[in-house]
Image: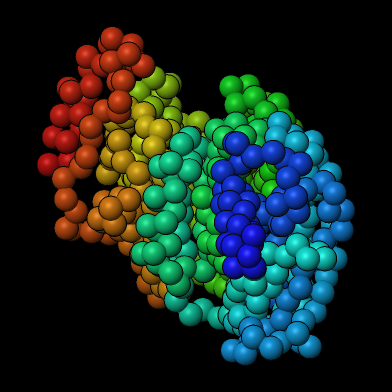
């Protein structure tokens, strides 16, 4: 074989090895290509103004891994400026082999500064990627919210994530409302789809998430959060004892974002009290402009085969008492937005993946949707939250604003120019639901639409 032919063969073999990293189902976990860091995402364990956490995974033979970083330079000749930090490493055997999960939290960074970083060791390194620290000011910024991705992540969930980031490339972070995957305890078909789906986006945009019931080992009767949650992500440990990285807050500039793991609510009464007390303290002490809350379960179940009624009245009361403007949720696999008893907060229920439910229409819903893949853009200023929910085509599906006047009073206004609602029942509606739930659908939908006239 001549030299050129050898190069071609090596090139093709290298390309196949790299592209296989996005297709884990057929891959042999003992393959050396897995020495390269993968499942890389950035987030925050501590203040966004001065730190950046990073998590990644390698083949279990890679026992030591590092993060290297520097302030981003225009020149590629930056070797002398690189700082190095050793990762914390934990070995874990999953359904697709044994892996080392690595994480690091870079601290002491400058505000509003772009850094380049890579992770790895020896000859096995990720590409250099960039992140920018928070400014710590009250300047306007945006972030993106995604409801459940969960199923067919690679095949269909990917299109929502892709469209959202192309729509809002200057977003400061991504927020996921739980059920990122269908079976959180498994990599095959789950985390092995979720991470390659985000690819460089998760390496470049800090990712925050609250756990969903499908991040539990048994989604139907949750008893423990999958180990993958803490192995895959590095979130704040400022929640109530025993709920670190599930219930937590992040102060990004002038907003406080609070993740509540309400999945503990039905199974862990003392934990619930702990969470309520913790939440009230966080609401009481906050001096910034806005608190936004995210939890997986919606305040009322909306799938047509689920029970009616407010699920978390103690939390609802706290939100109202402390004038929380916006609560972002998921779980129902439908779209809904509304205020309960006409008062703030605005509750949002959304879904980004392809799995869809048929919807019920309780009185508080002001905008509904079904059989849609959606993402939400949230634009923040000191006196205004502008919310826009878009379909995967990029069309505006819902929009509203919450404004704060000089006395701190909040005013809600829905966009006056929204199009008709999309209320198509999902695929296999007739077989997945009881006859009476199917038969009553058209009447319930028409009553809902008439109520709003
Ligand atoms: Fe879900």
In the image, residue 280 sits, relative to residue 265, either above or below, namely below
The answer to whether 214 appears left or right of 83 in the picture is left
Residue 263 in the image: state x and y as whole percent: 61, 34
Tell me the quadrant of the picture where the N terminus can be found: bottom right
State which quarter of the image contains the C terminus: top left
Residue 282 against residue 247 in the figure, above or below = below
On the question of residue 55 being in view, the answer is no
Residue 423 picture location, percent across and down: 23, 35
Identify the residue shown where x is 59% and y is 89%: 74
Query: Percent position (x, y) of residue 127?
Result: 64, 68
- Say which quarter of the image contains residue 137: bottom right
Left or right of 211: which side holds 232? right
The residue located at (43%, 41%) in the rendering is 155
Scheme of image coloration: rainbow
Count of picture labels:
0
Asked whether residue 197 is in view, the answer is yes
160 and 246: which is toward the camera: 160
Residue 218 appears at what percent x and percent y? 64, 24
Outermost top residue: 435
**Direction from residue 304 to residue 44 in the image, left or right:** right
Q: Give me the residue at 61% from left, 41% from top.
A: 24
Quadrant of the rendered image containing residue 221:
top right
> Residue at horizontal 63%, vertical 65%?
2
Foreground residue among 8 and 138: 8
**Picture quarter containing residue 254?**
bottom right
């Amino acid at each position: 074989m001549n030299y050129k032919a050898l190069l071609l063969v090596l090139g093709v073999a290298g390309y196949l090895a790299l592209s296989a990293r996005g297709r884990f189902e057929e891959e042999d976990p003992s393959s050396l290509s897995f020495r390269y860091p993968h499942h890389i995402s950035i987030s925050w364990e501590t203040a966004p103004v001065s730190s950046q956490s990073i998590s990644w995974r390698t083949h279990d033979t890679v026992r030591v891994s590092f993060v290297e970083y520097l302030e981003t330079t225009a020149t590629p000749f930056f070797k002398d400026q690189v700082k190095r930090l050793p990762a914390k490493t934990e070995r874990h055997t999953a359904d697709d082999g044994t892996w080392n999960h690595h994480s690091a939290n870079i601290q002491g960074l400058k505000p509003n500064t772009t850094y380049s970083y890579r992770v790895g060791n020896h000859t096995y390194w990720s590409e250099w990627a960039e992140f920018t620290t928070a400014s710590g000011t009250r300047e306007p910024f945006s972030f993106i919210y995604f409801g459940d991705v969960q199923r067919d992540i690679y095949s269909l969930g990917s299109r929502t994530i892709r469209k959202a980031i192309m729509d809002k490339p200057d977003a400061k972070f991504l927020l996921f409302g739980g059920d990122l995957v269908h079976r959180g305890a498994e990599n095959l078909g789950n985390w092995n789809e979720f991470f390659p789906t985000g690819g460089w986006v998760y390496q470049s945009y800090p990712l925050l998430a609250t756990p969903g019931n499908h991040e539990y080992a048994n989604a139907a009767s949750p008893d423990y959060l999958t180990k993958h949650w803490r192995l895959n992500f590095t979130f704040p440990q400022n929640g109530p004892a025993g709920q670190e990285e599930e219930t937590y807050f992040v102060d990004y500039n002038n907003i406080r974002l609070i993740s509540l793991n309400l999945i503990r609510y039905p199974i862990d009464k003392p934990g619930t009290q702990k969470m309520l007390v913790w939440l009230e303290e966080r609401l009481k002490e906050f001096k910034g402009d806005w608190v936004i809350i995210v939890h997986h379960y919606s305040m009322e179940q909306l799938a047509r085969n689920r029970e009616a009624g407010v699920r978390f009245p103690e939390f609802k009361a706290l939100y109202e008492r402390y004038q929380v403007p916006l609560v972002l949720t998921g779980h129902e696999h439908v779209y809904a937005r509304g205020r309960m008893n006409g008062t703030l907060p605005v509750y949002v229920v959304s879904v980004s993946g392809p799995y869809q439910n048929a919807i019920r229409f309780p009185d508080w819903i002001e905008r509904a949707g079904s059989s849609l893949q959606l993402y939400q853009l949230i634009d923040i200023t000191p006196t205004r939250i502008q919310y826009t929910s878009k379909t995967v085509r990029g069309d505006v599906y819902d929009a509203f604003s919450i404004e704060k006047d000089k006395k701190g009073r909040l005013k809600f206004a829905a966009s006056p120019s929204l199009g008709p609602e999309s209320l198509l029942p999902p695929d296999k509606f007739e077989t997945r639901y009881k006859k009476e739930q199917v038969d009553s659908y058209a009447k319930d939908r028409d009553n809902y639409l008439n109520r709003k006239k």
